[in-house]
Image: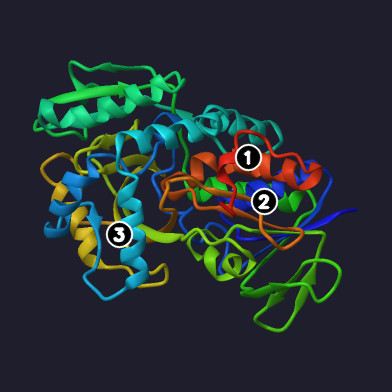
Amino acid sequence: MARSIVIGAGMVGLATAWHLQEHGVDVTVVDRSGVAAGSSWGNAGWLTPGKTIPLADPSLWTYGPRALMDPDAALHVPFRVDAGLWAFLARFASHGTHRAWDRTMAKLTPIDKIALEAFDELTAGGVDAWTREGPFVIGFTEEPHSKGFLREIEGVIRHGQDVPFERLDNPRELAPQLSDRVTVAYRLDGQRFIEPGPYVQALADSVVARGGDLRTGLEVRSIGSASPLPTVVLANGEQLSAESVVIATGAWMPHLARPLGVKVRVQAGRGYSFTVDTDEPARHPVYLPFQRIACTPYQGRFRIAGTMEFRRPDEPLQPRRIQAIINQARTLLTGVNLDERFDEWVGSRPVTPDGLPLVGATRAPGVYVAGGHGMWGVVLGPATGKLLAERIVTGRTDPAIAPFDPLR
């Protein structure tokens, strides 16, 4: 039986492991911390291919400079001497044009279209976790603030996705958590959401139940070729060999992938979240695009997530970023106890300069990468895992992941 080692127990890594098992591959998953210990745990859990779009757009040129001077802005870049970070930001900003947005959106659309059915396949295969339909409630304090959202949705539709949305007369019928300051609102249908931590744990349980080996608390030092097979060298000196190795370590990917020819920079774009109690039960996700705040029902509470903070992935949580989300949300939400917060969290999302993931073979025979999804690792994780597993086993590259060549 063929064997594979998957490094990383987040959504992308575990989905790849699960689909390798579908092809009859014996799988070992290793992670330095545990299941969903990176950006998979505390995110908003949105399965929204209709919002899985390029991160850089023309608004970056007006919003970005203002954000740098606003301590409550969703975008945060620390003022420090970091040549690599500033070089990344320059390349990222260079993609903030209409032409670049369309070019990137065209490359994301094929995998966006199969994202939800990939979740259905996991459910049919025994993954014991739910996905739930929206609607998603999108709110604005004034009409001009909605223009960017409408432009994005129209762009997604223009590229071939079906994204039903309509204006709401009274958004508080669906989302009583919205205050009276929200005067313009839409409902977005055809999308889903999950509770990400429990979902990824259920996926891990399924991998193990199907015969996979899940080993946590193991840090990978390097990947070499001491034998005819790719060899994973652990920090404790142990070596693991298999016919294939998959690096799915999110924002930490460069440590292992760069020596293998993956030169595209992966920058940690850190997101923050916390959960709160609400006076009325939260039934539907809520999005405040102008403030870039995403809210989701989560285990009887309301998870509030936001911020794109460009720091190193292992830096500690910055309480000021939590406060920035609170300051933005306080007048837009009502019946929400922002002063008693649970599960304050920061997670490092892997962002690439061109907004495209890194999925495919490295220069080292038998070694692959799966990551660089930015904010979209959860929604695109199962489809990524399915198509990469097919590439590993058959050698065929599906057109949906061809633009994500990690050696580009």
**Residue occupying image coordinates x 34% and y 31%:** 284
Residue that lies at the very extreme toward the bottom in this rendered image: 237
Secondary structure at badge 2 equals helix
Residue 398 location in percent, x, y?
Answer: 67, 35
Measure the C-alpha gap from mark 2 to mark 3: 32 Å
In this rendering, position of residue 133 left or right of residue 393 = left
Q: Nearer the viewer, residue 10 or 126?
A: 10
Residue 141 visible in rendering: yes
**Residue occupying image coordinates x 90% and y 53%:** 1
Verify CB contact (< 8 Å) between mark 1 and mark 3: no
The residue at which mark 2 appears reads as 205
Under mark 2, the amino acid is: Asp
**Residue occupying image coordinates x 39% and y 43%:** 298
Where is residue 33, by image quadrant? Answer: bottom right
The residue at which mark 1 appears reads as 128
Secondary structure at badge 3 equals strand
Under mark 1, the amino acid is: Asp
Q: Nearer the viewer, residue 221 or 286?
A: 221
Secondary structure at badge 1 equals loop
The residue at which mark 3 appears reads as 309
Q: Nearer the viewer, residue 186 or 404?
A: 404
What numbered label is drawn on residue 170?
Answer: none
Q: Quick one: label 3, few (<14), some, or many (20+) residues within 10 Å?
A: many
